[in-house]
Image (cartoon, helix red, strand yellow):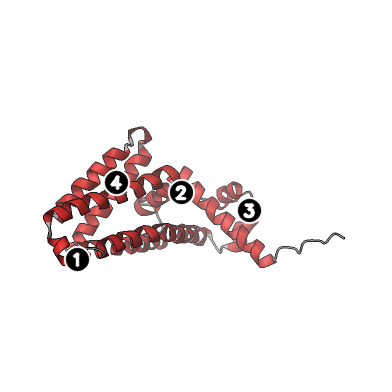
Amino acid sequence: MTTTAAPKPRRAKGEQTRRQILEAALRVIADRGYGAATHRAVAAEAGVNLSLTTYYFKDLGEMLAQAFIHYKEQLHRDAGSQWRAVFDHIGRLDAADLADAVVRRELAESLARRLADYLENHIRCQPQGVAVEMAFFFDLHLHESQRELAYKLRSRFLQDFIEVCRRLDTADPATDAELIMGALHRLECEALAVPGQHRPDTIFRQLRRLLTALLA
């Protein structure tokens, strides 16, 4: 006797379509820039009827904002384990260790390697994500609401860097965290803009030099 599979619930199907549209919007932004992300372009990229982009989102601004939030949530999940490992590493050191110049140099090298490996993996395996970040962080034509979302994402990660610098007792944790994040953004942007010039060893050397100076 054969049985007929139960139809997929309408709500689950709708959520799948909505996610499909959001991920298509991210691909359009990554491939062609923020200005190219129109209802028609996103619908074509998603392979859905044009009317569905207005069914799930009240306007283009909401669709693009939700696409960035969707990306932000993915990024937070991916980065979470990395930050836990960094904090665990630092937590194993006592005050005497953190005051030792040799230990601090070794720590700077270890953190530089961890950041370089993460950045290299992000650039190699998720170039679309890097392009989306660049679009939302640096496109001067973004709507104010999108700028606010980008600011919140950047602030979220900045707080993690500030906490690392605070635990390492750097001279100025807030400023030092800004310097580290600025270096990471620049390295990502350069790797994306000029792929042929991208060298993982260069990323590591630059991060090691910066972190060694901040932890001296």
In this view, the mark in front (1 or 2): 1
In this view, the mark in front (3 or 4): 4
**Amino acid of disc 3:** Leu
Q: Tell me which label, 3 or 4, sits earlier in the chain.
A: 3
What is the C-alpha distance between the residues marked 3 and 4?
37 Å
In this view, the mark in front (2 or 4): 4
Instruction: Count how many numbered circles sit on residues in the image.
Output: 4
What is the C-alpha distance between the residues marked 4 and 1?
33 Å
Horizontal and vertical percent position of residue 28: 51, 47
The reply to whether discs 3 and 4 touch (Cβ–Cβ < 8 Å) is: no
**Amino acid of disc 4:** Arg
Picture quarter with the C terminus: bottom left
Q: Is residue 60 left or right of residue 11?
A: left
Q: Which residue is rendered at x = 34% and y = 45% of the image? A: 188
Residue holding disc 4: 186
Q: Tell me which label, 4 or 1, sits earlier in the chain.
A: 1
